[in-house]
Amino acid sequence: MTQSGAWVLVVEDEEPTRRSLSNFLVRRGYRVDEAATAAEALRAWDAHRPDVILLDLGLPDLDGVDVIRHIRRAATTPIIVVSARGDERDKIAGLDAGADDYLSKPFSVGELEARIHAVMRRLGGPDGDPDGRLRLGQIELDPARRAVTVAGSPVHFSPREYELLKVLLSNQGRLVTRERLLRAVWGLEYAEAREYLHVYVGRLRRKLSEAGVGPQIEQLIATETGIGYRVAASKPATPAEATTAG
């Protein structure tokens, strides 16, 4: 059994299929949320910001493609479409809307897990190692396990704190605007809620400092007054990388 600890949201209106997928993932060590409708899926996504979404397109209240578009306006959460719609046009529509992968029913659970592993490895983006892990000094964030360590010791973060740290570590050497962080972690409706950001960045710094990073956390995650935060680079940044992420 893998002990990933990664959070998967299973969006499927057929209960037997949804339960079967969820039970398999739980046995494999994943944490799982379930949703039978688009409305439930969007509420669960907003509340927990899962690491991966398994999404059926044929939902009773809204087409799955519209769910993808909604999520893509605010975040890059990996989405794997799992659908009985095998027509090429449906696959293109899902992928064009922003899905990361597409599995046609029926499929093997082994193939599903391989696809999950593949999108999890890409979570770290260009700043991640081959396994998707992000490092900055003594800090390591492992998206596949949804875990953060400082000098090898685990540090607990709330889901929002974890998402905020992940976005920051994914932009090393770049200035990240407050609006970008608010959209990515809280969603479009919070784009002006700057007080959230001030409080949560303060929590991140405090927890990392208490875990052993020390006073240099202010240099690793530095405030750019009135703009956002500049994250230290673990390696020299190229001219193209040293731009603003906003």
Image (cartoon, rainbow, N blue to C red):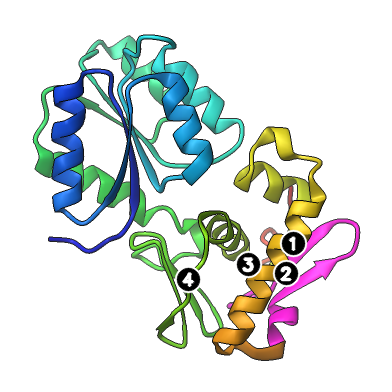
- The answer to whether residue 41 is magenta is no
Q: Which residue is mark 3?
A: 172
Disc 1 residue type (three-letter)? Val
Say few, some or many: other residues with alpha carbon within 10 Å of mark 3 (under 14 / 14 to 19 / 20 or more).
many
Image position of 155 with respect to 230: above or below: below
**Mark 1 → mark 4, Cα distance in angstroms:** 17 Å
Under circle 3, the secondary element is: loop
Under circle 4, the secondary element is: loop
Mark 3 and mark 1 lie on one chain; the one further toward the N terminus is 3
Q: Which residue is mark 1?
A: 199
Residue 202 circle label: 2
- The answer to whether residue 231 is magenta is yes
Residue 207 screen position, x and y as percent: 60, 77
Q: Which residues are magenta?
A: 216-237
Q: Nearer the viewer, residue 163 or 140?
A: 163
- Please report contact status of discs 2 and 1: CB closer than 8 Å, yes or no: yes
Disc 3 residue type (three-letter)? Gln
Residue 224 screen position, x and y as percent: 85, 65
